[in-house]
Image: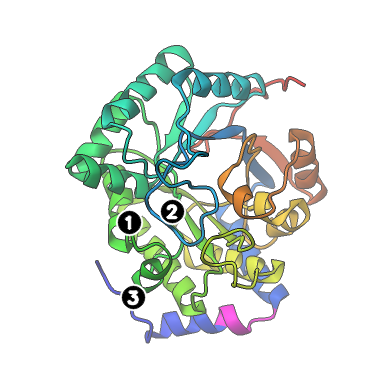
Amino acid sequence: MQTVDRNSTEFRNYLELYEKAPLLELGALADAERWRLHPDPVVTYIIDRNINYTNVCVADCQFCAFARRPKHAEGYVLSFEEIGAKIDECRALGGIQILLQGGHNPYIPFEWYLELMRYIKQNHPIHIHGFSPSEVVFFSERFGMSVPDVVRELRAAGLDSIPGGGGEILVDAVRERVAKKKAQTEEWLGVQEEAHRQGMKTSVTMMYGMGESHADRIEHLFRVREVQARTGGFTAFICWPLQPEGTPGLSHQVKTDAVTYLRTLAMARLICANVPNIQSSWVTMGLKVGQVALRFGANDFGSLMMEENVVSAAGTTYRATIEEMERAIRDAGLTPRRRRQDYSMVEEPLAAVA
């Protein structure tokens, strides 16, 4: 893994910009970059559903309030039929994708995951955006398989793309402190590169506010940019703050504010100019801040997010209807358009069912 030179002029300049630039000036720089990359006044969004197939997990991340240890009374694994019913509800609202993620459950055999995707494709066909890099590394270790083989088998069974969940901060000193049992930086990015090699598109994320330094956040963005320069496989970048209130090990952290979010988002747009799309995280920040983010570098409004369990287990998440999302985009002077995971447009708007 290449090291990031924190003493380079470029790194120090970006760090100074992040820490010292007036907020509106920083936003204007990011907004200009957004318009350079996306000259049309369009903001995209997707209708999908986050399906957490299990909450049983042995990773013991300090920031997670969703997971349950094995044998816990509240632990679950959804049946194929329950997952299928959730997909049908998603499709009834015009949904074209599911986000399939779960805990690191040591009791689920690998064949279960393969059978699940075959079942979905046969009975409830939809785009499967699933299994974060951390899950793929867990599968590799648990089942004694190489990462390329895990990705290849998942893809052959029906996996369409990989989400960027579990990215947190891509600096090992931070990951070892808050999630030492989970994929470290090189492993996490290695899954992304392997997926890109096999022709899959992925997203990439950052969750900040875990006591890391500003320089750690900038290094994370540099690492994203480096991988994208080699592979071109990232479709979008998404960042959001830790929701510390309900977390088992980070509840002492001060919840970051909207200004920090907007500054971080703007830096992502400026540093990761080779990642085509930046999502506004209105689900964690609220529609108003999410709307402002559209002038701080974001060109995408993320997802309707029919169901969200992980972040909401730790703290507040926001809900909105399709109409409310589109109104927020229009009120910002922009045009809403529905998209697919690869950012191709859904040409005919699908009628929503009340």
On screen, residue 280 above or below 17 = above
Label 3, on which residue? Answer: 4
Tags 1 and 2 touching, CB below 8 Å? yes
The structure residue drawn at horizontal position 79% and vertical position 49%, both measured from the top left corner, is 333
Q: Quadrant of residue 264?
A: bottom right
On screen, residue 56 above or below 86 = below
Q: Quadrant of the C terminus?
A: top right
The structure residue drawn at horizontal position 33% and vertical position 62%, both measured from the top left corner, is 185
Q: Residues within 10 Å of mark 2 (few under 14, many from 20)?
A: many
Residue 287 image position (x, y, % from top left): 75, 51
Q: Residues within 10 Å of mark 3 (few under 14, many from 20)?
A: some
Q: What colouring method underlies this structural image?
A: rainbow
Q: Quadrant of the N terminus?
A: bottom left
Label 1, on which residue? Answer: 183
Q: Amino acid at mark 2?
A: Gly
Residue 245 image position (x, y, % from top left): 64, 62
**Magenta highlight range:** 17-22
Q: Magenta region's main secondary structure?
A: helix
Q: Secondary structure at mark 1?
A: loop
Earlier in the chain: of badge 2 and badge 3, it is 3
